[in-house]
Image (cartoon, rainbow, N blue to C red):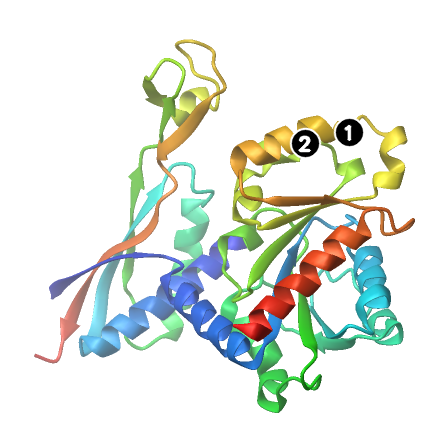
């Protein structure tokens, strides 16, 4: 027996798969957004609103995990995006391998939008712990926190807030019914992650959606130009 | 379960390393896991013992876990303290302005293996 020293992080093999997938998507100009949230955060309503508002401006895809999926594939297709099924085999998170498998045929055929923009929304498994630890190969991590969940979530799930590039605070139309302080939420999140972009929105009334949609289109356009 | 995914990723890395090093059989794998990494070590070992039997070179390989203590630093009074005992609030001055120095590691340290050479 001999000893082989490794000193590699446990996510090392996944990190490499993730970078390979990100490079492939970038080369095709396909912008991948990893969406993480707890169940019941308003993901479906947000996605359907985004599809409705953006379908004329970009080719849209939604990848759904097979367990704990909140998003209805039929509703997604009816709204104007293409739905893609991913297989997690009962795992509590999506990793780069699963994401790559789900996107295989899309990558093979390439973007259908010609010179237009392509955005893929990856619906990760609905919890705020495990998905934060695995790079899916996405260009950006987007996290959803809904007003009813409370402004103390950054204290309970710090890693998720640290790993996210964007935080969307949903259900702002319900603010008057909950003890949710937008100031406290901003302060707690920014302490964990000073660079994070925060978009408070109501997918129901449309309030705040413009800024989020502009960010999505901008990011997809920058990737295409690069 | 979270530990299931961790075991699958560890095994994938070891299979890659085994191929590079012409390993015939792995005797043991040593992980370094921080006290606050969120891993339940007993469950990790259970998952490992179940999965290792399905793999030719990992069959019977022992999983060893080195637990790495967690330490938090207080920016207010500049002292370090044990994270697991006191949490986020500094026990010396009561400040919440603290950060984790070490204790969320998640590393494969080394493997013991029989190789072709």
Q: Secondary structure at mark 2?
A: helix
Instruction: Answer few, some or many: residues within 10 Å of disc 1's Cα (few below 14, many 20 plus, some between 14 and 19).
Output: some
Q: Is residue A214 left or right of residue B110?
A: right
- Say if residue A152 shows up in the picture: no
Q: Are marks 1 and 2 in contact (CB under 8 Å)?
A: yes
Q: Secondary structure at mark 1?
A: loop
Residue, far front: A225
Residue B104 point in image, percent of width and height: 39, 41
Which label belongs to residue A180? 1
Q: Residue at x 85, y 33 (%)?
A: A175
Instruction: Answer few, some or many: residues within 10 Å of disc 2's Cα (few below 14, many 20 plus, some between 14 and 19).
Output: many
| Chain letter of the residue carrying label 2 | A
Foreground residue among B59 and A175 = A175
Q: Is residue B17 above or below residue B91?
A: below
Do badges 1 and 2 share one subunit? Answer: yes
For marks 1 and 2, give the CA distance.
Answer: 8 Å
Q: Splitting the image into 4 quarters, where does residue A72 fall? A: bottom right
Foreground residue among A65 and A77 = A77
| Chain letter of the residue carrying label 1 | A
Q: Is residue A114 above or below residue B32?
A: below
Mark 2 lies on residue: A185
Quadrant assignment for the N terminus of chain A: bottom left
Residue A92 point in image, percent of width and height: 59, 57
């Amino acid at each position: 027996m001999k000893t082989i020293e490794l000193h590699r992080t446990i996510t090392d093999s996944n990190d490499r798969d993730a970078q390979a997938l990100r490079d492939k998507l970038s080369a095709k100009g396909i912008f991948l957004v990893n969406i993480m949230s707890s169940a019941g955060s308003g993901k479906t309503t947000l996605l359907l609103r985004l599809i409705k508002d953006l379908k004329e401006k970009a080719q849209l895809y939604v990848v759904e995990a097979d367990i704990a999926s909140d998003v209805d594939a039929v509703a997604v297709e009816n709204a104007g995006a293409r739905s893609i099924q991913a297989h997690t085999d009962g795992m509590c998170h999506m990793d780069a391998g699963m994401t790559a498998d789900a996107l295989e045929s899309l990558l093979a055929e390439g973007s259908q939008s010609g010179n237009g923009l392509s955005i893929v929304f990856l619906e990760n498994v609905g919890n705020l712990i495990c998905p934060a630890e695995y790079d899916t190969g996405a260009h950006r991590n987007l996290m959803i926190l809904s007003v009813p969940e409370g402004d103390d979530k950054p204290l309970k799930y710090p890693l998720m807030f640290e790993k996210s590039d964007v935080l969307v605070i949903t259900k702002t139309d319900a603010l008057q019914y909950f003890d949710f302080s937008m100031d406290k939420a901003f302060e707690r999140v920014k302490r964990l992650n000073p660079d994070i972009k925060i978009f408070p929105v109501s997918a129901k009334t449309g309030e705040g959606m413009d800024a989020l949609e502009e960010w999505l289109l901008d990011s997809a356009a920058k990737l295409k130009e690069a | 379960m979270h530990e299931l995914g961790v075991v699958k990723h560890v095994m994938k890395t070891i299979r890659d390393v085994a191929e590079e090093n012409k390993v015939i059989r792995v005797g043991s794998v040593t992980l370094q896991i921080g006290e606050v990494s969120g891993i339940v070590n007993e469950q990790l070992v259970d998952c490992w013992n179940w999965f290792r039997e399905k793999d030719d070179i990992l069959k019977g390989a022992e999983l060893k876990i080195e637990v790495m203590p967690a330490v938090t630093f207080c920016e207010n009074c500049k002292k370090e303290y044990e994270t697991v005992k006191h949490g986020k609030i500094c026990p010396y001055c009561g400040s919440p302005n603290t950060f984790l120095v070490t204790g969320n590691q998640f590393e494969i340290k080394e493997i013991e293996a029989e190789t072709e050479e």
